[in-house]
Image (cartoon, rainbow, N blue to C red):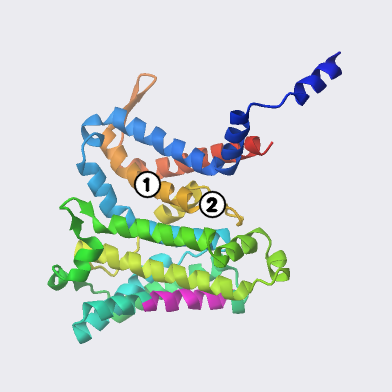
Amino acid sequence: MTATASQTEASIPKPLWRSRLGKVARQYGLQIGITCVLLVIWGLFVMGAPETFLQSNIYAAYMSTIPFFAVIALPLTMIVIAGEMDLSFPSVMGVGMVAFTNVWLLTDQVGLAFIASLLAGAVVGFLNGVIVVKLKIPSLVATVGTQFFWRGFVLVVTNAGGVSLVPIKQHPLRQALVGRIGGYLPAQMIWAIVVAVLVWVFLNRHKFGAHVYLIGDNVESARLMGVNVDRTRMINFAILGMAAAFGGVLSSFEQSYFWVSLGDGYLLKTMASVFLGGTSVYGGVGTVYGTFIGCLIIGAIEAGIVAVGKVEIFGLVIKLSGFWTQLIYGLIIVISVSLQNILSRRLAR
């Protein structure tokens, strides 16, 4: 009787809406998971500090700072999907600005200096790729070394001295990159969205993206399918280098000063955004949407903690400050990634 009942139940088709809902959930499980994390965190911040998070000023502040690492995290997603890692991008931000300031001071041409910055970043990124691909050094090890090398290069060339960018504060290029649209919307947020769209097109509508996923999933299979693995990897590193230089320009333009320490503090935020967004450290899995939402979460945490000020748990009042940021970064990443993995396994059944 039991077997007959089970067979009868299995033979009954599921409602069409349940079938479609299950398909969507399986296909977009990671995106749904990270969106839920964002909504939960935002809800907690609104309840903890409504006077801050129900006002527009906090969101203008977020949109002015998040793009500095978001424009790097998005291309970094492609690197990680391909099964590689690059830890040198904070230093590449400084290299790009060294190129910018030197060309600008020599020629007084801001546009030419901007192009030189992007080219310098691309060249440095390409060199990282050459070291990884041609010398067969693991990318994690190689980029730890180049991180120190390029930071030293910046300090030596500049003699550890910064450069004021106040003279170009009213330049059209600066206004286009970090100006305020309508007196409120930071232009850098628009550029972060533009970078997100470009990376999405590369990953989902271009053969380059298909090659990136294939390499991350199984590099030998990718070679058998005719993918030029070495070239794809080197281009990937070059794109990230250019993005790092672009992020450095945005950050320096916003502050109207080039600090030789440019890039310090961005490593953890950028990496956390990528992994929080569901990109697998083993390669082959990742989405632009996930990384973008991860950037919003990571960018909101510190200000949210300070705004909330204190929490009460089982009668125990805990005062929050910026020192809690690192702890909560780690806690949110571990919990969210664990939930995403559990959700992915259940939806795959």
Instruction: Tell me the residue at 47%/64% (across/down).
Output: 87
**Is there a contact, CB below 8 Å, between mark 2 and mark 1?**
no
Q: Which residues are magenta?
A: 119-132
Q: Residues within 10 Å of mark 1 (few under 14, many from 20)?
A: some
In the image, is 344 to the left or to the right of 250?
Answer: right
Dot 2 amino acid type: Thr
Does the segment drawn in magenta span residue 20? no
The reply to whether residue 265 is in sight is no
Q: Is 127 one of the magenta-colored residues? A: yes
Circle 1 residue: 296
Q: Secondary structure at mark 1?
A: helix
Q: Nearer the viewer, residue 247 or 138?
A: 247
Return the residue nearer the eye: 159 or 77: 77
Say which element carries label 2.
loop
Q: Determine the residue located farthest toward the bottom in the rendered image.
A: 106
Task: Name the residue located 54 percent from the left edge and 51 percent from the top edge.
Answer: 279
Q: Which mark is residue 304?
A: none
Q: What is the count of numbered marks?
A: 2
Residue 14 spot, x, y in % from top left: 67, 27
Instruction: Decide: is 179 above or below 125.
Output: above
Could you say where residue 176 lies in the image, as x and y percent from the top left? Answer: 23, 65
Q: Please give the name of the residue rendered at 54% of the width and 74% of the height, measured from the top-left corner.
A: 234
Q: CA distance from mark 2 to mark 1?
A: 16 Å
The residue labelled by disc 2 is 279
Residue 67 percent across, percent down from the top left: 33, 56
Nearer to the camera, 321 or 85: 85
- What secondary structure do most residues of the magenta stretch adopt? helix
Left or right of 230, for residue 224: right
